[in-house]
Image (cartoon, coloured by chain):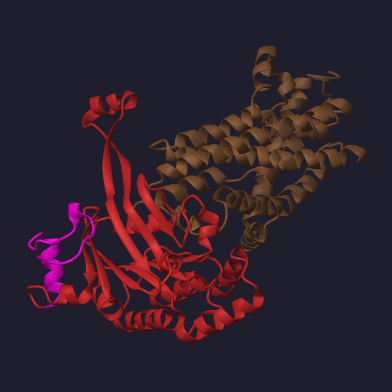
Chain colours: A brown, B red
Amino acid sequence: MLHPAYVELARSRFLTLLAYRENFWTGIAVYIVYIGAYHFLWQAIYEGREALGGLTPAQMTSYLAVAWMARAFYFNHLDREIAAEIRDGRVAIELIRPYNYLAAKLAAALGEGVFRLVFFALPGMAVACALFPVRLPPAQVWPAFFLALFLSYWVNALVNVLTGLAAFFLLDNSGLMHARRVLVDLFSGLYLPLSFYPAWAREVLGFLPFQAIAYLPNLAFAGGLRGGALARALAVQALWIGVLALAAAALWRVAHRRLAVQGG
Amino acid sequence: MGRALMTEEIVVEAVGLTKEFRKFRSRPGLAGAFADLFARRYQVVRAVDRVDLVVRRGEMVGYLGPNGAGKSTTIRLLAGILVPTSGLLRVNGMVPWRERERFARTIGVVFGQRSQLWYDLAVRESFRLLQRIYRVPEEDFRRQYGFLAEALDLDPLLEVPVRHLSLGQRMRCELAAALLHDPPLLFLDEPTIGLDVVAKRRIRAFLRELNRRRGVTVLLTTHDLGDIEALCERAVILDRGRVIFDGPLAELRSGPGGSLEEVVHAIYQGQLQHGGGERGAASGLR
């Protein structure tokens, strides 16, 4: 159901960010530094070895480059936005409008995601390819990769929504939001592929949504997911989107009852 | 007159409307903070306490009360922003919070202390965004905007970014934003707060026109008795969440003290006995 209000919210977020697009150039520079640092670190770790954790050095560099640039796309501050709106009462304005609050937040964040893809992730990826030996996957992998990337946006956004809604139940959820960022980056496989984690940790992470944010799409890009494994990865992402969306809707229903708009 | 027609005229109907908030009470000192980690203590605050209220189509009702009396909370309940703890509530034939998205199309809301415009966008773009959010057909939008632009003199403001508007200009735009989808019911929460005399008069004149010519039902809270005198024939006074007066403004004016301000002051101070309270349908001074 593509309600025009949601399209409009996505569009207006995109246009608002367009006015501030210079802010994202520094972001590209910072991410390139990260990719470079990890690239050289991994070169030292490989020490001429053919493969580690199932990845060749070239695959590893490709994984790192796409991991950071994918993050440039799916990353957003939905949790902070929601928590701030609840705390200072701006949520009241959202609740006089004829749309679903969470859907409206997700739509605006998707507008931001598209902006980040066009003005941050794609140019950033071009720079990364020019500077480091990134191997782009064969043509037939691209559709699946972009599908996985699109799904990873929703998994991450819904995790953010849940963290933001915690503001209803905690006196201060800033610690939780900070923990969310660190945990997502660590457990999603941004710093290193999950195949490097010990077996027991992989087992545990397999039951968590974070792998569906970065590890699965990035592995697809680096050429580490083929055929049935790819289909399974997409199914895992879709499953997490369903579970997290149901949880967010349920939490919002409880939260609305407890809402206390201060002031006035 | 048929019963169906009678009920159709009722726009707002609240019976025993109650809203309680749970407030966290911290214990004093370091030991107290530590104890709070394990067992939090809450205090239940009743912001709106068994309020009965009926508003009929075409009425303009002033909602008064000292700070913290529960006026804004009542408006937020009626607008579907908050979910009542108990009581019955029907507005425009719907339960506001339960059918919130459908219900939202039938009301306009203005908060004097909060903006519903997009801070970074020009006024024109905020209006366009609202048109799409409320799915107002182009022709209806033009007609309604034409009416609002003339009454509120909006045209010179259209290209101005919202952040550059003066408070008076912004309030005119806020009113327009709340009315672009032509709702039959308008809630105003302190719409004239902080405005100068000229801006106040202009907004009052607009609200009168909106009510008389367009038949829009208006419920407004204010601390400015001038608003009430200029606009309302009926006032409802709230104190500590309870309705302590509900009746014609004339009745308030004729109370001891002579002026509206004296009488309202006396009621706020608890120096005047009034009807209502436990006996339900509230009316009249004693």
* Number of marks present in the image shown: 0
Q: Position of residue B221 (x, y in %)?
A: 31, 66
- Check residue B276 for magenta coloring: yes
Q: Is residue B169 above or below residue B70?
A: below
Direction from residue A65 to residue A7 in the image, left or right? left
The residue lying at 9 percent from left, 78 percent from top is B258
Q: Is residue A99 in view? A: yes
Q: Quadrant of the N terminus of chain B?
A: bottom left
The residue lying at 57 percent from left, 51 percent from top is A100
- Check residue A21 for magenta coloring: no
Q: Is residue A249 above or below residue B59?
A: above
Q: Position of residue B158 (x, y in %)?
A: 55, 79
Direction from residue A136 to residue A236 in the image, left or right? left
Q: Is residue B229 above or below residue B89?
A: below
The residue lying at 68 percent from left, 37 percent from top is A34
Q: Position of residue B228 (x, y in %)?
A: 27, 75
Q: Name the residue nearer the viewer: A255 or B86.
A: B86
Q: Position of residue A89 (x, y in %)?
A: 41, 53
Q: Name the residue nearer the viewer: A236 or B187.
A: B187
Direction from residue B4 to residue B126 in the image, left or right? right
Direction from residue A223 to residue B119 in the image, left or right? left
Q: Quadrant of the C terminus of chain B?
A: bottom left
The residue lying at 71 percent from left, 31 percent from top is A239
The residue range painted magenta reads B259-286
Q: Is residue A25 in view? A: no
State the image quarter where residue B213 is shown: bottom left
**Farthest-out residue, right:** A139
